[in-house]
Image: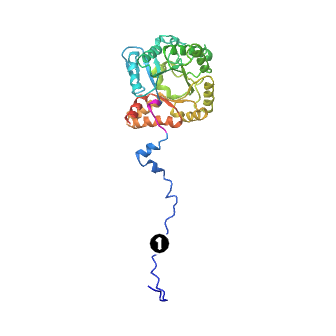
Amino acid sequence: MPFNGKVRDAAPSAPAQAAPAQAGPAFPTTRMRRNRRTDWSRRLTQENVLTPADFIWPIFVREGDNLQEPVEAMPGVVRYSCDTVADAVGEAKDLGIPVVAIFPFIEPDLKDARGSISIQEDNLVCRAIQAIKAAHPGIGVQCDVALDPFTSHGHDGVLDENGEIINDDTVDVLCQQALIQAQAGCDVISPSDMMDGRIGAVRHALDTHDFGHVQILAYSAKYASAFYGPFREAVGSASTLGTASKATYQMNPANTDEALREVALDIAEGADMVMVKPGMPYLDVIRRVKDRFGMPTYGYQVSGEYSMIQAGALNGWIDGEKCMMESLMAFKRAGADGVLSYFSVEAAKVLKRG
């Protein structure tokens, strides 16, 4: 229509609208729960992964035939005779566990003050190594180099007339023990005694006797811990050690800087891998060791840790399977490359189940 010079009345104005609410603390733009909302998203954003390849399974052996003898203080753990241990290791191998660690229960009448049976070529440990390697050559076998299962006093070393550990004499025996284990087919030697200089001495002994291929996983930061009690029952050293202390050679639980010094010495002396023991009470030490050295680093979930979880589960106080898996993941979160755990087989079954 042509303009006629008149202005139309303006349309009625709309009611005033309230201003949109401003974002504030109650309305975050970053919502951490979004990544947790679905199972697939939780798996996608998971920072650490646990697999059977992360486990070293400690197993106990003893003399006898056709034995699987329960360890009372460690529910679910048994001592195997040499004729049954290979079948148990076979199950671990089939689950994807790469290494087993052998610990012996020695009859009291075979023990003496120097742990002499530890350096006999046909001893229990050597026969167990041979049985495992004959049946399962593809699995790794690790052995402790230490005297406490073999000595009549339960200590990790040779004593003088005053009951003091003689460091260098002990190291000499440990080198002999390492050599017979390597000769029997052991793949990984693990000195757990905490004597000064033993890593360098064992490395030299192995190298000069054509065992340069044998690895050393050093118990580099092993603490004088109260968490070892069930293990000492399992290897039969609880009654021989009694109330005696190992504080003159194992570390003070209050120290972490000292752990870094111990690890540095073991690396300099030829350790291929290092370990912190116990595990969960010392996750801070594992983290410091991994951050400082970047070495293959392992934690030992020791017998006391295992038995506490088992006891809680058997009493119905906790969900045993969930606590088992959570505890093992804690090692990976702390920086460990792997875990020695008596839960290894059961945890591997859970992982396989998915």
Where residue 171 appears, x then y in whole percent?
A: 59, 16
The dominant secondary structure in magenta is loop
238 is higher (above) or lower (below) than 284: above
| Furthest residue in direction left, as rendered | 66
Q: Can residue 84 be seen in this view?
A: yes
Q: In this view, does 120 lie above or below 90?
A: above
Q: In which quarter of the image is the C terminus?
A: top left
Residue 140 on image: x %, y %: 47, 22
Residue 286, placed above or below residue 31: above
Q: Quadrant of the N terminus?
A: bottom left
Q: Residues within 10 Å of mark 1 (few under 14, many from 20)?
A: few
Q: Residue at x 44, y 44 (%)?
A: 42
Q: Give the range drawn in magenta.
A: 48-53
- The kind of residue tagged 1 is Gln
Residue that carries the numbered disc 1 in the rendered image: 17
Residue situated in front as seen by the camera: 287 or 314: 287
Magenta stretch: includes residue 22: no
Give coordinates of residue 328: x percent, y percent.
Answer: 46, 34
Answer yes or no: is residue 170 visible. no
Task: Check the image and tell me how it is coloured.
Answer: rainbow
- For image coordinates 58% across by 32% down, the residue present is 294
Give coordinates of residue 344: x percent, y percent. 43, 29
